[in-house]
Amino acid sequence: MKWFGFGFNGFGQIKPGRKDEEEGMRVLSPVALLDSLCTCAETFSRTGLSRKQKTETQKVVASWSRTAVIHRTAVCVCAGQRRWLCEPGVEEQEEEQQETEESLSGVENSTPLKRLAVSLALGTGHAVLLAASGTVYTWGHGSHGQLGHGTLVSGDEPQAIEALWGVPMKSVAAGGWHSACISAGGDLYVWGWNESGQIGLPSKGLREERPREESIEKDKLKGNKKEDEGTSDVFISIQAFPALVDLSEAAEIKKVSCGSRHTAAITSTGDLYTWGWGFYGQLGHGSRCSSDEPKIVEFFSGGGMSVEDVTCGLWNTFVSADPRDRVAS
């Protein structure tokens, strides 16, 4: 798989650049992660495996100012021209495995976490946990509805989202102030703050940012210059209950990831959809425009590529994709 990145590049997380250069801070369209960004040839050459085997990227994880590129046997942390390589040897790996086994040996199977947790996603101040039963639990800050309980109240203890009872989930994700999950049937549910359209529902803030001329022209076509005033109730600033978001009628959703104020999802057909805040190009549409409607990223679908994985940083997005003919074979 080949990895691509787009969005905030202020610290050279996607490609070498200077954060004091306005255009260098933004990558508006997907670009392939360069070898110079995430490899240290002199270190990889010390082992018996080929450089290609050693540097094959398995996963990308993004933080505020750095990007961690996980290779087959090493992790490279990148920030512009600076790189830090962590390459544990066989002895270190065995010690880590032994320590892990020892730490788990004293944990009874009946403990809640070991019996319950399948995966955990962390937002800015809240947590979303997926249980083995498919039930979703949330806790932490709830001021923007990100806990999904229908209120703006915070909670110290994990609480099941009652609105999702009876619908088993298979994955969860958390953004800055919003959350998401995918059902076993491939449906996408999103809830929380919608200030930038990150949960895929009409955002008044985004509509107000549109050029006045565009709004006037739209009103003329519909013959109603008071349309926004008369339909203001359809705008959603906070969605405190999980809402179903339709991306494609012909495909299920297989992966979702949330940034600070944007969301990205992959369909079972290998298409990537993004929505929310796009000021740094983190939506991958070649512009700085935000969107409260999920839109397909044409770079991949039009380029004959099938998207296999996606992970969102706060203000950027990283995607792995393969040629569709290779996926089909």
Image (cartoon, grey):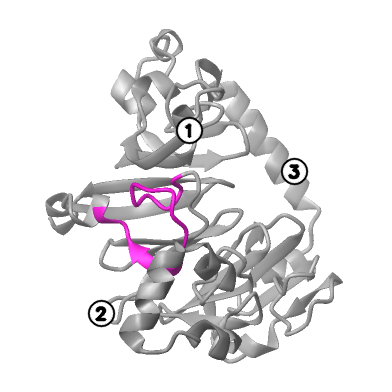
Q: Which residue is mark 2?
A: 250
First in residue order: circle 3 vs circle 2:
3
Q: Residue at x 29, y 76 (%)?
A: 251
Which numbered disc, 1 or 3, marks the residue closer to the eye? 1
Q: Disc 3 marks which amino acid? A: Glu
Q: Disc 2 marks which amino acid? A: Ala
Magenta residues?
A: 281-298
Q: Secondary structure at mark 3?
A: helix
The quarter in which the C terminus is drawn is: bottom left
Q: Magenta stretch: residue 283 in it?
A: yes
Q: Residues within 10 Å of mark 1 (few under 14, many from 20)?
A: many
Q: Magenta stretch: residue 296 in it?
A: yes
Left or right: 94 as drawn, with respect to 154: left
Q: Secondary structure at mark 1?
A: strand
65 or 105: which is nearer to us?
A: 65
Q: Position of residue 141 (x, y in %)?
A: 80, 65
Q: Which residue is mark 3?
A: 102
Q: Residue at x 37, y 49 (%)?
A: 284
